[in-house]
Image: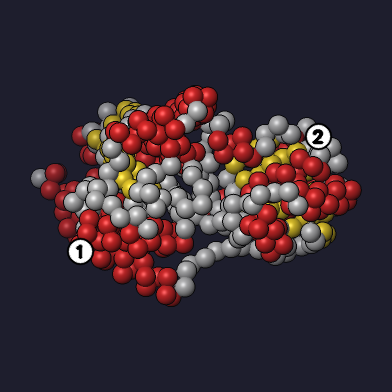
Amino acid sequence: MKIEQVTTGLSIKRSVDAGTDEQQRIVRDIVQDVRHNGDRALFAYTEKFDGAKLYSLKVTQEEINEAYEALDDQMIKIIREAAQNIADFHAKQKRETWLYTNADGSVFGQKMTPLDSAGVYVPGGTAAYPSSVLMNVMPAKTAGVERIVMVSPPGKDGRLPAGVLVAADIAGVKDIFKVGGAQAVAALAYGTESIKAVDKITGPGNIFVALAKRDVFGDVDIDMIAGPSEIAVLADETASAKEVAADMLSQAEHDTRASAVLVTTSESLAQGVADEIEKQLATLPRADIARPSIEQHGAIYIASSMKEAIQTINEIAPEHLEVITENALDYVKDIKHAGAIFVGRFSSEPVGDYFAGPNHVLPTNGTARFSSPLSVDDFMKKSSIIMYSKESFDKHGAKIAAFARLEGLEGHARAIEARNE
């Protein structure tokens, strides 16, 4: 793995993927097909892309019961505990409606209202993601969303993974459908005979899912267009090369386009991590994915000082940031841009992926510069409340009318003055 010195104007490798023209065309065609043909289109695409011939899309209670039987009792207990941790963390985010009254009797405030419905997309394919279920559903439940719909692509046997179904049931999801890809996004956005349309769609997926979310945005809300997973590690000479390398590979194994970066003030750590990555890749089951990720999107940077190292981290604006230094918590105040910050040796990134409580749906591709993790706020909307008193109206009405005329809107001005007649 190449080791470089930090330089001014560091060129950060991004993996933004807007899709090819052909992929965009395919997605547009699928979305329109689902809009016009509903369930019939969903059945056809599920057979074509997932190899499953279905006659019903909705998961039955019998399938959920069988999922519980297929999972070890200890694993079910772990999922329950993780769900509770996530619920507890997100409960602290919830904001309430507030009002205040001025001295003249005018009342102002903000009304917080949960969305009526939300759709959660859970990826399928080579892996099952019960954690994605919990991270998307729990904040929606905490916000007070009444109807939560989950979609996920089935296997060739027409079933969803046991872990995904158990997690959904524990999280309280009642409407679970066996459909994935762009067609599932279209169904959530516009509705079909089986799936009622929702107000917001969240959850990660492949490029076709991402393009579909972009295509339907505006008709419904979406969380984000997520890119490949990223991790950056800020470390000094006190860090363990073995542990840092393992953490970097934990993200590299996600996707050949994933990014794993170390920024350190220690040359010996830099070399040690490079050696450890090679050593650990030799036995990593998903090395065929992790190695291209490390070779094409990985990097080790040596900074001359911790100040320069932190500046580099802020320029990268990583999805996940680990701070493994002496007095690690002291440096958090200087970190401006990161989706989630894991502080200290025992806060390995998978702690946040699965169990700690904070959300693992995070901004990627440098968007941590201006966006935030998925939260309760994403499932609520705000309405401003304005109740002007007569005293305040009499005092400020002429100013408001004047402002309206400055903008050439006579009707606005007259609406104010009509109350003075």
The number of callouts visible is 2
Q: In the picture shown, does residue 306 fall above or below 44?
A: above
Circle 2: residue type: Glu
Residue 155 at x, y percent in the picture: 41, 50
Residue 373 at x, y percent in the picture: 51, 43
Left or right of 138? Residue 109 is left
Tell which circle, 2 or 1, labels the residue nearer the N-terminal end.
1
Residue 319 at x, y percent in the picture: 59, 49
Q: Nearer the viewer, residue 238 or 253?
A: 253
What is the number of the mark on residue 36? 1
- Would residue 131 be visible to someone looking at this image? yes
Left or right of 150? Residue 235 is right
Residue picked out by circle 2: 326
Image quadrant where one finds the N terminus = bottom right
Mark 2 nearby-residue class (10 Å; few <14, some 14–19, many ≥20): some
Helix, strand or loop under label 1? helix
Image quadrant where one finds the C terminus = top left
Judge depth for marks 2 and 1 and give the one in front: 1
Q: In the picture shown, does residue 30 fall above or below 266?
A: below
Identify the image quadrant of residue 115. Answer: top left
What is the number of the mark on residue 279? none
Q: Nearer the viewer, residue 342 or 287?
A: 287
- Measure the C-alpha gap from mark 2 to mark 1: 60 Å
